[in-house]
Image (tube, coloured by chain):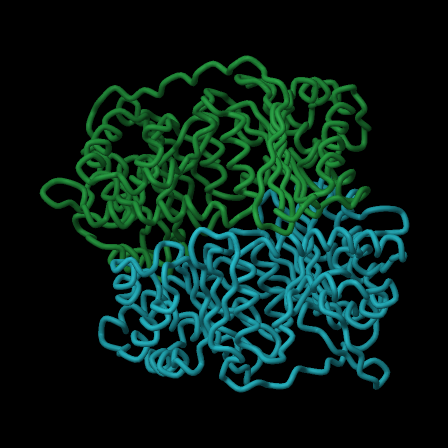
Chain colours: A cyan, B green
């Protein structure tokens, strides 16, 4: 393994790749109690079509998430229970582009890691256990259906995109998971859970060489990385300008924003997203004149937020929260973006926001959980999380002004609202 | 870790915990208040109003700018409930100067800002600003009303109000929505002055700075804190045990939310690690009885779990279930509790729960904020022991301890929030 160091940030990382092609990263955190491992496959909610033996195959919405639920099953019983018996707390989650399996512990790190590497690489499903899981997942879906913040978000993506699979919930729907079989899960596991499409990241007071040796021993070679049929690129206009739904909520919830085209990859794309992030913060963050104006007028409250998010072949920037009149928030943001000028005060604010980004990154280095997950995401995207401070530093005021002018135009924005019954 | 505790002024305690491990530090200001229906709203409102501006940084934008300039330091208004006590104030996290490009000292400026927010707010004619009080009152009102948006959280809120009606614990810590709109700036200013004089104050720092330097900075920043007798009233005695009561309410929801409320006892200091092990084994995680029985075996739910409040001496079990399976779920929960109470505990699950709780305490040592939060709780309970000692105690909890605690849990409420279309 190779050691990379960033002495200015006080960070080191060991990097290596197993013979089977699995990338391994270890962040040493001397003196920390927590030992953490994150093992992820590049298979998520957006993977909906794959080429298998030269033939295209559709994957129902919710398959990656279903697989995540079932992978803890082993012929000898539940891997979660065995990890618990070793003193580890385990979990897993499915995103749009990856599925991650993780545990944290303070003792027995090596046997826990063995367990993790084994269960993630050992598919074991029976028709009965798949049927039972369908029930559990249908409860999970019902829970999310009752959650207005999830619903407003999901409707927002459906308003923005016409065809991109990011429109569909990661869990799938009651209908889409109805047809998933044990065979589908085996097939997807074989195609996507191959070392070249996976990554292992660990952090804590752990031994990098031992981790590497276990990964060499326990992660079997697999096929080539999967060939995905990528969704077609969509233009920048939303599918619907405004969508609204009613639910038992106290006052309207809204989410509004725009699509971003993903024309770059790796660190260049990460920089685009950082530019989007800093620009949105500049226009709408708590320190911005526009936020102050909206807050003082009672148009928004402290629930107001602004954020960005990216996924395969796309990204979005958006704002949301609770408010009395979502249409008014939209109008004020459009006017505010049009009127925005990169004057001396804005330039100074951008510099402070860049500083804040550096500080935020430094503080995240104290989390044995955050760093490995960030690095896994970056690896699938083809860059290194330690590039983040330099990327933020490189953002120029003119770029931010151009981004805001381009993005917050009325024809690019979609508004999703959940209104009270 | 090097810990230092001192009484700065009567009733004002500063705890500093020095360690070199982190890239960040934290500084917390807590004023301890009893949870009471008559001042819940204004207590919750006060930190939000104070956070709006100080004499030198008179609005939110200027505070945001100052914090961004301090490399993204955060200084958030805080309201933490511990049983029938509220800790209100501010919670700050900031990057450690050792890793900043110019080696800037964030700590000194953060402590100064904390002191200013608390003691030198933006005022008009010596009173808290009317416009700040009104807009934060509206925000608090909206926040309280929005509790209905989170169905599980709403079910818990209703269950607590019903089970603890007539006790301070039944009061929602943010108060009632309408009360939030009624608070006026003159009355809030009086309340603010009263709070500054009479509340016990707990200040915490965890990071790489030397305790004596922190003390200096804090003494300077809090010099103008008025003197007074700082006392927290004793919590009222728990009422007699009640029979199990079943309540059902309806809402337009897909999934039913079941909440079972149990009363334990107060003042179980020596039993806190055992209480934590009991909870872990019963419903704390994905290897717990409730998870295995209700989710994995019966496929009744996706989310199920139990949580205990060691301050109040109570436990809640929550489960998101199909509206038609309430009885089955309730019976399964009570059955698992009865099994534990009868001593039906395998060595493997006990060991697993002990390890998991020990790990949880030890992992608290990895976060400056968690270290401070644990210490605050211990101070409030008048309990000794640090995270390491609790981890060691958890690893010694016996099956008998767990069975005893299970037997002491008395179910008092079964609350169900169900869909209107459910049978």
Vertical arrangement, residue B323 with respect to residue B61, above or below: above
The residue positioned farthest toward the left in the image shown? B125
Identify the residue at horizontal 41%, vertical 27% (top origin). B85
**Residue displayed at 47% across by 73% down:** A242
Tell me where residue A332 appears, x and y as whole percent.
Answer: 31, 71
Can residue A391 be seen in the rendering of this structure? no
| Quarter assignment of residue B332 | top right
Q: Where does the image place residue A305, in percent across and percent down from the top left?
A: 41, 61
Q: At x 39% / y 65%, what residue is drawn?
A: A326
Percent across and percent down for residue B248 are 60, 35
Q: Is residue B144 left or right of residue B48?
A: right
In the rendered image, the vertical position of residue B237 relative to residue B150, given as above or below: above
Which residue is nearer to you in this view: A372 or A174?
A: A174
Specify whether residue B166 is in view.
yes
Seen in the picture, residue A1 relative to B402 is either above or below; the reply is below
In the figure, residue B242 lies in which quadrant?
Answer: top right
Give the x, y percent position of residue B276. Answer: 63, 29
Numbered-mark total: 0
Q: Quadrant of residue A189?
A: bottom right
Pick the front one: B325 or B302: B325
User: At 35% across and 36% down in the image, what residue appears?
Assistant: B88
Side of B83 where B14 appears, left or right? left
**Which quadrant holds the C terminus of chain B?**
top right
Left or right side of A262 for B112: left
């Amino acid at each position: 393994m190779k050691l990379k160091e960033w002495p200015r940030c006080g960070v080191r990382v060991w990097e290596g790749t197993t013979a089977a092609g699995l990338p391994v990263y270890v962040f040493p955190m001397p003196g920390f109690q927590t030992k953490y491992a994150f093992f992820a496959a590049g298979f998520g909610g957006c993977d909906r079509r794959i080429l298998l033996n030269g033939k295209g195959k559709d994957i129902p919405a919710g398959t990656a998430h279903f697989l995540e639920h079932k992978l803890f099953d082993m012929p000898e019983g539940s891997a979660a229970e065995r990890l618990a018996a070793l003193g580890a707390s385990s979990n897993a989650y499915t995103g749009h582009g990856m599925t991650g399996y993780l545990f944290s512990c303070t003792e027995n790190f090596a046997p826990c890691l063995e367990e993790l590497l084994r269960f993630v690489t050992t598919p074991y499903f029976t028709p009965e256990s798949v049927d039972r899981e369908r029930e559990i997942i249908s409860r999970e879906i019902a829970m999310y259906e009752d959650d207005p913040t999830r619903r407003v978000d999901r409707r927002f993506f459906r308003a923005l995109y016409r065809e991109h699979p990011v429109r569909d919930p990661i869990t799938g729907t009651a209908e889409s998971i109805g047809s998933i079989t044990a065979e589908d899960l085996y097939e997807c596991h074989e195609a996507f859970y191959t070392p070249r499409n996976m990554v292992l990241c660990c952090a804590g007071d752990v031994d990098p060489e031992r981790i590497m040796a276990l990964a060499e021993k326990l992660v079997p070679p697999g096929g080539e990385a999967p060939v995905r049929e990528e969704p077609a690129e969509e233009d920048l206009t939303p599918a619907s300008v405004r969508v609204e739904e009613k639910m038992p909520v106290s006052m309207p919830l809204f989410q509004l924003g725009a699509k971003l085209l993903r024309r770059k990859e790796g660190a260049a794309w990460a920089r685009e997203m950082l530019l989007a992030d800093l620009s949105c913060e500049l226009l709408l963050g708590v320190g911005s004149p526009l936020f102050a104006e909206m807050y003082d007028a009672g148009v928004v409250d402290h629930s107001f937020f602004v954020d960005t998010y990216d996924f395969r072949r796309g990204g979005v920037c958006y704002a949301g929260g609770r408010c009395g009149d979502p249409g008014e928030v939209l109008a004020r943001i459009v006017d505010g973006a049009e009127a925005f000028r990169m004057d001396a005060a804005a330039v100074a604010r951008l510099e402070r926001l860049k500083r804040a980004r550096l500080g935020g990154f430094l503080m995240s280095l104290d989390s044995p959980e955050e760093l490995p997950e960030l690095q896994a995401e970056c690896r699938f995207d083809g860059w290194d999380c330690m590039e983040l401070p330099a990327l933020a530093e490189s953002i120029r005021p003119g770029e931010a002004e151009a981004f805001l002018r381009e993005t917050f135009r009325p024809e690019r924005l979609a508004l999703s609202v959940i209104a009270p019954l | 870790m090097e810990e230092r505790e001192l009484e700065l002024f009567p009733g004002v305690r500063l705890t500093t915990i020095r360690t070199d491990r982190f890239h960040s530090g934290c500084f917390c200001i807590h004023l301890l208040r009893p949870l009471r229906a008559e001042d819940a709203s204004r207590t919750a409102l006060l930190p939000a109003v104070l956070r709006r501006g100080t004499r030198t940084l008179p609005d939110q934008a200027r505070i945001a700018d100052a914090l961004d300039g301090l490399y993204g330091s955060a200084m958030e208004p805080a309201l933490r409930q511990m049983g029938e006590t509220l800790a209100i104030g501010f919670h700050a996290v900031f990057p450690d100067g050792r890793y900043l490009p110019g080696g800037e000292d964030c700590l000194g400026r953060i402590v100064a800002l904390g002191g200013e927010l608390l003691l030198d707010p933006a005022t008009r004619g010596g009173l808290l600003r009317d416009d700040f009080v009104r807009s934060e009152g509206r925000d608090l009102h909206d926040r309280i009303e929005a509790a209905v948006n989170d169905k599980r959280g709403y079910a818990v809120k209703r269950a607590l109000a019903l089970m603890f009606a007539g006790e301070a614990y039944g009061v929602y810590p943010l108060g009632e929505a309408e009360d939030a709109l009624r608070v006026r700036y003159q009355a809030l200013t009086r309340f603010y002055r009263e709070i500054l004089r009479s509340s016990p104050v707990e200040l915490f720092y965890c990071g790489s700075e030397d305790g004596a330097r922190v003390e200096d900075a804090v003494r300077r920043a809090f010099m103008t804190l008025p003197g007074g007798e700082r006392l927290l009233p004793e919590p009222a005695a728990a009422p007699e045990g009640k029979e199990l009561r079943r309540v059902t309410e309806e809402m337009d929801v897909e999934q039913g939310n079941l909440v079972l409320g149990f009363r334990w006892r107060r003042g179980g200091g020596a039993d806190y690690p055992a209480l934590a092990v009991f909870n872990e084994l019963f419903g704390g995680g994905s290897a717990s009885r409730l998870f295995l029985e209700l989710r994995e075996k019966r496929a009744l739910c996706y989310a199920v779990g139990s949580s205990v409040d060691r301050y109040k001496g109570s436990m809640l079990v929550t489960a998101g279930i199909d509206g038609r399976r309430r009885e089955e779920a309730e019976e399964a929960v009570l059955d698992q509790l009865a099994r534990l109470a009868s001593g039906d505990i395998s060595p493997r699950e006990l060991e697993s729960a002990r390890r998991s709780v020990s790990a949880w305490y030890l992992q608290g040592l990895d976060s400056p904020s968690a270290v401070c939060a644990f210490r605050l709780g211990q101070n409030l309970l008048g309990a000794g022991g640090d995270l390491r000692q609790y981890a060691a105690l958890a690893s010694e909890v016996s099956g008998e301890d767990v069975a005893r605690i299970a037997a002491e849990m008395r179910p008092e409420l079964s609350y169900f929030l169900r869909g209107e279309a459910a049978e």
